[in-house]
Amino acid sequence: MKTKTILVLLAAGALWAVQPVQAHHAFAAEYDQSKPVTLNGIITRMEWANPHGWIYLDTKEGGAVKHWMIETAAPSQLSRHGLKKADFTDGMTAMVKGYQGKTDPGLANGRTLVLKDGRSFYIGSVGGPNDGAEPR
Amino acid sequence: MPSIVPTFEWLEGLAWTTALRESPYGYPLIETSHVACIVIFAGLVIMMDLRLVGLAFTNAPLAQIQRRLFPWQMGAFVPSTATGILLFCVDPLRYYLNVFFLAKLVLLVLAGLNALAFHLKTYRRADRWDEDSQVTALARFAGAASLLLWSATIISSRLIPNNWFK
Amino acid sequence: MLPFFQWCDGLAMSQAYRDSTYLFPLTQALHILAVTVFVGAIVIGDMWLLGWGPVGQSRASIARSAQRVLLWAGLAVLVTGIPQFTTNALTYQRSWLFVLKMYLLAVTLVFTATVRWRVAIAEEGRLPSWVTRAVGAVSLSLWMAVTISGRLITYYG
C-alpha cells in the first residue's frame, strides 16, 4: 500500500510539475503550428506588457495593408533575450516570424523579431512549438 | 447608460498600473501570489464541501471543521481578491471584454451567495449540526452546489487567456 | 533523457493535442482543478500537524481521510497531466526552472510519503509537539515552493 502511494504521488507530482509551464496559455488553443508566417512591415505600436507583449505590425499584401497583432513573451523574458522597451519606436521597420492564429487570421504568435539594423531576438512565449527558434 | 470603457482606459493609463504592466518582477509576483492564494482558498473550501456532502473527513464534526477552516479560508481569500483586483487594473479592457472573466465573476458571486445562505440558515443550530437532519440535508445541498460553483469558477479562470470569442 | 522527451513529443496523442483547439485548454483546466483539490488536502493535513485542528480531534483520522482525497486527486492530476506533458515535452526539457522544479518536487513527494505520513498517523503524544509542527511547516513550505516555482517558469524559465 505504501509503495503504491509513493508511486502515485510521484507520478502525479511529476505531471503536476509540468503543467504550470503552460500555465496561462496553451499554444495549440489559439495558434496554428502548421501556419508559419514571415511578416515584413512597420511596427505601429508595441505594448511592452505582462503577461504578454503585443507587437502591432502592418504588412503590405498586394497593395492592401494588413494589420497584424503579434503576441510576444513577458517583459522579463524579452529582457533576458536582449530586448529593451527602448528598442521599439512607432513607425519602425521590422520583420517577425511566427505562427498564425487559428480563429483570427490577423493574430500571430511571435517567435523571432529582426530589427532594421539586423539584430535578431527571440520573442517567443514559453510553451510554444519546438521549432528551433529559441536560442540555446 | 454611460460606457465604462473610458474609465477603464483611464485606469490602464495610470502610472502605477502601467508600471505594473511593464514590470519584470512586480507583475509575476502578483500573478503568482494570486494563483497560490486561490489554490489554498479553493482547496480548503473544496475540503469543507467534501465534508458537507459526506465524501471525506466524516469522522470530524461538521461544526468543528468549519470553525477551524474558516480563518484560513478567509486568510487566503483576502489576498486572492486583492491581487485579483490589481491584475484587473493592469488590463481592465481585456478582462471586461472576455466572456470567461465575466463568467468567473458571476460564478464567484453565486458561490459566495451559496456560502452565505448556508451560514445564515444554520448559524443558530451550529452546535447540533451533526444531529440535526435538516442541517445535514441543507449541508449536502450547499456542499454540492459549492463544489459545482467553485469548479466552474476555476475552469472559467483557466480559459480566460483563450481568444475563442471576440 | 532526451530520447524519452523526443518519444513523448512524437506520440499520436501529442499531435492530437497540438492539432485540437479545445482539448488542451479543457484538459489543463481540469488539471488545475485536480491540483487545487490535491493542495487542499495537503494544507488541511498540515494545519492539523501545526496544531490548528480541533482539540481532541484524532489527527490520524484526518490524515487518513486526507490521504484518500490525495490519492484520488493525485490520480486526476496524473491523467490530465500526461497529455500536457507529452505535447510539450521538448520545450520543458530546455527550461532550467522546470528541471529545478522537478528536483524540488521529487524531494517534496518523498518527504510527504515518508516523514509526513508517519508523523501524521503517529499516536497522539508519541512525538514531541515541536516535531509535528516542524513537519507541518516544512510540508506547507515545500508544496507552496513547488506551486510557485511552476508559475515562475513562464516569466523566468
Image (tube, helix red, strand yellow):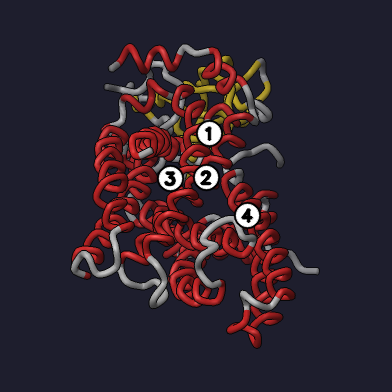
Q: Which residue is mark 4?
A: B153
Q: Position of residue C98 (x, y in %)?
A: 31, 34
Q: Which one is nearer the viewer's eye here, A101 or B35? A: B35
Select label 4 or label 1 by which is in front. Answer: 1
Q: Amino acid at mark 4?
A: Thr
- The quarter of the picture where residue B33 lies is bottom left
**Alpha carbon separation for disc pair 4 and 1:** 18 Å
User: Label 3 near label 2: C-beta < 8 Å?
Assistant: no
Name above or below for residue A123 compared with residue B5.
above
**Alpha carbon separation for disc pair 3 and 1:** 33 Å
Name above or below for residue C89 compared with residue A47.
above
Q: Regarding mark 3 in the picture, which secondary structure is present there?
A: loop
Q: Regarding mark 4 in the picture, which secondary structure is present there?
A: helix
Q: Residue at x 52, y 32 (%)?
A: C79
Q: Position of residue B119 (x, y in %)?
A: 64, 78
User: Label 1 near label 3: C-beta < 8 Å?
Assistant: no
Q: Amino acid at mark 1?
A: Thr
Circle 2 crowding by C-alpha within 10 Å: few under 14, some 14–19, many from 20: many
Circle 1 crowding by C-alpha within 10 Å: few under 14, some 14–19, many from 20: many
Read off the chain for label 2.
C
Residue B33 in sight: no
Q: Which residue is mark 1?
A: C80
Circle 4 crowding by C-alpha within 10 Å: few under 14, some 14–19, many from 20: many
Which disc is residue B78 wearing?
none
Q: Position of residue B61 (x, y in %)?
A: 53, 72
Q: Do the residues at pointers 2 and 3 share their chain?
A: no
Q: Which one is nearer the viewer's eye here, B141 or B82? A: B141
Which disc is residue A48 wearing?
3
**Alpha carbon separation for disc pair 2 and 3:** 34 Å
Which disc is residue C34 wearing?
2
**Alpha carbon separation for disc pair 1 and 2:** 9 Å
Does residue A30 appear left or right of residue B64 in this picture? right
